[in-house]
Image (spheres, grey):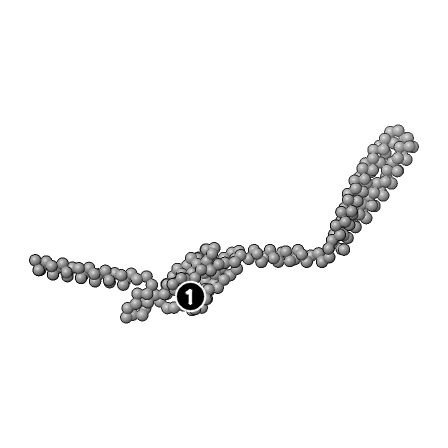
Amino acid sequence: MPAMINTFIALNRLLILSGVLILISYCPVKAQTGDSSSYRYYYFINSNPFNAEAFFKDSLLGLTPVRFTTSEKLSGKILLKKKGYKEETVNLDDYNFDKGIEVLLKPVIADEEKIVLKNYGTSFVKKRSLTGILTSGIIALATGTIAYNTKEKANDLYNTYIYTRNQDDLNKVNRYDLYSGISLALMQVSVAALIYFLFLQ
């Protein structure tokens, strides 16, 4: 019986020793022995949104979230790049090994919109005259319509005159041609005024 107890105790000690050795060998970050090369530094860098390219000294580490270990503590900066977002840098000198690093990427669209709005606002230095624009636009449209209609009427009357040889029809042709010419001239003046109020005022 004492021999069995001693054997049982020896087996327990062996199992405990094996478990300790296994835990030491699988320690994920800083399992340190007499050889300093087994000391590992664990780095975790993430971004929001993720899938940003992470560069260290011009070398691509991967897409965020990035996890890697090194035998030496790193110094310097990691550059994060993602299309449509501003580039961000991470200073490894201030790295927190307990928390890692989470970087919020800022979109570049907001800045582009500001530039577009600024250019749009400065394209017209002076305030436009709404009354002048509306008046010249309406007159141009009306006189253009009148010029077209009177010219069509003059053409119809001329076709009638060819068959009838009626002098009265010829007089009407001349009169409608005159109305069409006057309307066309007024339309051109109105268009010039519209251009002035829109771009040259």
Using residue 98 as the reference point, say whether residue 127 is left or right of it. Answer: right
The residue at the point 65 percent across, 57 percent down is 119
Q: Is residue 64 visible?
A: yes
- Horizontal and vertical percent position of residue 140: 78, 45
The residue at the point 84 percent across, 36 percent down is 154
Using residue 180 as the reference point, say whether residue 3 is left or right of it. Answer: left
Is 94 in front, or is 164?
94
Residue extending farthest to the top is 164
The residue at the point 77 percent across, 44 percent down is 138
Q: Is residue 53 visible?
A: no
Q: Quadrant of the N terminus?
A: bottom left
Amino acid under disc 1: Tyr
Q: Number of numbered discs present?
A: 1
The residue identified by callout 1 is 95
Residue 186 sits in quarter: top right
Residue extending farthest to the right is 167
Q: Quadrant of the C terminus?
A: bottom right
Q: Secondary structure at mark 1?
A: loop
- Horizontal and vertical percent position of residue 85: 52, 57
Using residue 10 as the reference point, say whether residue 193 is left or right of it. Answer: right
The residue at the point 30 percent across, 62 percent down is 27
- Horizontal and vertical percent position of residue 38: 31, 67
Using residue 104 as the reference point, say whether residue 140 is left or right of it. Answer: right
Residue 171 sits in quarter: top right
- Horizontal and vertical percent position of residue 19: 23, 60
Is 96 in front, or is 189?
96
Residue 72 sits in quarter: bottom left
Above or below 145: residue 87: below
What crowding class fits label 1: few (fewer than 14 Cα within 10 Å), some (14-19), or many (20 or more)? some
